[in-house]
Image (tube, helix red, strand yellow):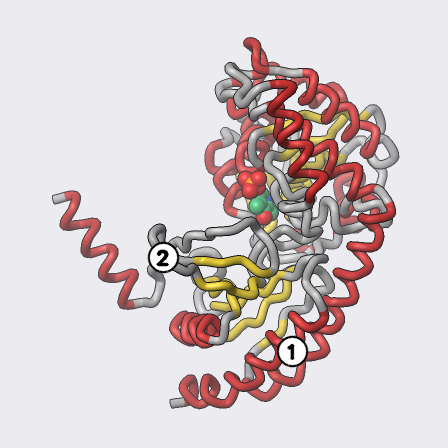
Amino acid sequence: MLLEQLRRAADERQARALTRRRRIAHSACAPHQSVGPVDAPSPQPLLTFCSNDYMGLANHPDVVAALAEGARLYGAGSGASHLVSGHSLAHARLEEELARWFAPYIPQARTLYFCTGYMANMAVLTALGTAGATLFCEKLNHASLIDGALLARADVQRYPHCNAAALDALLTASSSPLKLIVTDSVFSMDGDVAPLAELLALAERHDAWIIVDDAHGFGVLGDDGHGVLQALGLNSERLIYIGTLGKAAGVAGAFVAAHETIIEHLVNTARPYIYTTAAPPAVAHALMASLAIIEGEEGRQRRANLNRLIAELRAGLAPLAAAAGWQLGDSATAVQPLIVGDNAVSLALAARLEAEGIRVGAIRPPTVPVGTARLRITLSATHTSADVQRLVGVLADAVPAEAKREAA
Ligand SMILES: *Cc1c(COP(=O)(O)O)cnc(C)c1O
């Protein structure tokens, strides 16, 4: 019965071009990465525009060396959860360094390291979103924030994408004793940025708190790569910040930065923090190396290169999108969506690119709303101008055929 049901569901997915499959990478995460079956004699080299390794640190020699050094110093695994015996000097140092980074944006900031961003979001929303509280959630929030809100005992209200006026109305109508605004900073599938200064002003006015998920901003936004709070010059005790460390920072994990009283509460009550084995200390040790690069001169140069590539890509894509009737998302970040609408068209376009040796993710529902299937093009500081021109060239060749197919 169950298997029959699941097969039917799989057939329906297939019919709607929604089947997802995994590809196997044979080499490190980098703009040029080879992909193929386990036993492929020669995996296919692909120019890749779909990782979130925005700063190109996932395979940076200093970070790789620090990971190996961390393993020599602390071993392979932590052996237990943080509250039992798994909390190491490497985790503590990482949290102290990040607390130093966030001191200018959050008064009395402390930070807490998590194994993944998904878990950090579950932790914050369930530990703070208790019965009686209300979570005011942005419509396009990441799945991990949606799931955290589902698991929380709090009431949940949703406001339309980047619509501060609608949020204002919801906050005005609410009599909840604890109001928590929950939003991505950079939206993961669109690349646009939430109007955080406005949202923070609303939080101040309505005695609310604001939980900001900066998964796609940490490491890339702000002069020192400190993320969206630095980029926008924000400072408030009401900010509860989540940064992830597997994207621009190139390794793994996430952290929450908030007033020390909030962090202490998470340590004591957040189940996704308490009931899981601490990440290997070597991972935290490696992250110290990536933070040093992000904050230093090399980081500055990488961000400058990334921003040049973003401008170059947009200049190349804008006329193509106009010709094909597609929509180039309104994004100034490393996430550049080319919205084609139809699932099958997005897949055909990705397949066409792949035949030319280029890998771009075709993102379909339920990750994005129905009718907004897209190519999600992401750039890394380690891409070159020639890489970007190659992508634009192949897309230019693909446009007429694909546009015709859609019209047919
Ligand atoms: C990737 C992502 C997460 C999850 O972070 P992981 O460390 O990959 O679990 C959370 N929020 C947003 C917006 C993300 O893009």
Answer left or right for 256 relative to 121.
right
Residue 87 visible from this viewpoint: yes
Residue lying at the far front in this picture: please name it.
41
Horizontal side of residue 272 vs 193, given as left or right: left
For mark 2, give the secondary structure.
loop
Q: Which residue is mark 2?
A: 40
Give the residue pinned by disc 1: 317
Q: Is residue 223 left or right of residue 163?
A: right
Choose top left, top right, bottom left or bottom right for residue 337: bottom right
Identify the residue shown where x is 32% and y is 67%.
16
CA–CA distance in space, label 1 to label 2? 34 Å
Quarter that holds the C terminus: bottom left
Residue 36 or 344: which is nearer the viewer?
A: 36
- Amino acid at pointer 2: Ala
At a point 77% along the width and 47% down the height, the residue shown is: 228
Residue 95 in picture, x, y percent from top left: 73, 25
- Residue 307 vertical position relative to residue 103 in the rendered view, above or below: below
Q: Name the residue located 48 percent from the left edge and 40 percent from the top edge.
A: 147
